[in-house]
Image (tube, coloured by chain):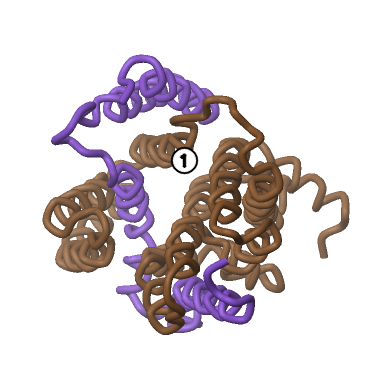
Amino acid sequence: MTLTPAQTLIILLMFAIGVIITRFLPFVIFKGAKSQNSYIRYLGEVLPYSAIGMLVVYCLKDVNLKASPFGIPEGIAVICIALLHYWKENTLLSIGAGTVVYMILVQYVFMT
Amino acid sequence: MSTNKDKIKALKAAFPHTVPIFTGFIFIGMAYGILMESKGYGFIWSALFSLLVFAGSSQYVAITFLTSVFNPFYALAMSLMVNARHLFYGISMIEKYKDAGMLKPFLIFGMCDETFSIVYSAEPPKDVDENWFMFFITLLNYLYWAVGSVLGGLLGSVISINTKGLDFVLTALFVVIFIGQWKSQKEHKPAVIGVLCSAVCLIIFGQNNFIIPSMIAILAVLTMLKRDYKQKNELAEEETE
C-alpha cells in the first residue's frame, strides 16, 4: 500500500461520488420533464442505439492497426459474431463462439 | 405488490440474460483483485471498491491513484471523465425506470455498461414483472463483479490456466446487442452515428481522450437530425393509420 488506509478510503469515495454523479444526474435533471420536453424524448429514443455503437468502439479502442497483429483477431472475431448472430440470433451462442474464436486466435495463431 | 413467487419468477427470467456477464465479470473482476493484491491492497479493499464504486474502468484507473501521490480532487475529476458515458445511459433509461419505485435508486446505482445494454435490450416474458426483472439483472451483475474481485484478491497467482483473450466476452456482448438492435430497427442512423462519431474521435483524440469528444459529436449530429427524424416518424404514423 502506497497510501494510508484513510487516504485510500478518500480516493475510494472520490471515485464512488464521480460514478454516482454520472449515473444519477440525468434522472435528477430531467425529473418529470420528460413527457413535456420533446428534445429529451427524442434523445431517449435514439441515444441508446448511438450509445451501444460507441460502446463497441470503446471496447476496441486499444486495438493497434499499425502493429502486428493489426487488429486481425478482433476483426475476425467480430465478423464471426455478426454473421452468427445474424443467422441464428442466439445471444449465448454468438457470444460464446465469438469469444472462443478470439481466444484461439490470440493464444495459438497470432502469438505476440 | 409483488409476492415472493413473482420475484423468484423474475429472477429465473433474468438469470439467462446475465450468463455472459457472469463469465466476463468473474474473470475481469478476478484480474482486478489480483492487480490490487499485487499493489498491496488486499481483497477487503477490492471488495469495498467493487461494492461502492462498481465501475470496472474507473476501478482500474483508481489503481493509478492508489499507487502515486495522494490527490483526491484529481481523482474525482478523473472519475467524472471516465464515467461521462453513463450520462447517455441515464437519458436513455428515464422512461424505462419511470415506474420502478423503491427499486429505482439501486437500478440507477448499478447501471454499468453491461447492465445498461442488457436491461435496455432484453424483454421479460409477459407474465414477469418488468421492474423486478430489471432489478435482478442489475443485482446479479453487481454480485458477479464483487465475487470476482474478492476471488482475485484471495487466490492471487494460484490460478494458472491460460485465460488470455477471455475478456473479449464483453466486447462480444456489445457486438451482439448492436447486431440485435440493428435487426430490430428500420432506422439505422443513430447506430451508425454512434460508431462513426466514436471512430473518428478515436482517430483524432487517441484512445485515452476520445469518449467526451465522441459524446459531444453524437449529441451534435443527433440534434441536427432531429427534424428529419420527426418528419419521417410522423409520415410512418400516417401510413399505418
Q: Position of residue A101 (x, y in %)?
A: 41, 20
Quadrant holding the N terminus of chain B: bottom right
Task: Name the residue at the top extreme.
Answer: A109
Front residue of this view, candidates B24 and B221: B24
Q: Secondary structure at mark 1?
A: helix
Residue at position x 30%, y 54% from top?
A: A50
Picture coordinates of residue B19, whole percent (x, y): 62, 36
- Protein chain holding label 1: B
Does the rendering let one see residue B137?
no
Q: Position of residue B157 (x, y in %)?
A: 61, 39
Hey, which quadrant is residue B126 in on the image? top right
Front in this rendered view, residue B17 or B185: B17
Residue that badge 1 annotates: B170
Is B70 above or below relative to A51? below
Q: Position of residue B219 (x, y in %)?
A: 24, 67
Q: Colour of chain B?
A: brown
Q: Residue at x 33, y 15 (%)?
A: A109
Q: What amino acid is at disc 1?
A: Leu
Label the purple chain with its letter: A
Q: Nearer the viewer, residue B211 or A81?
A: B211
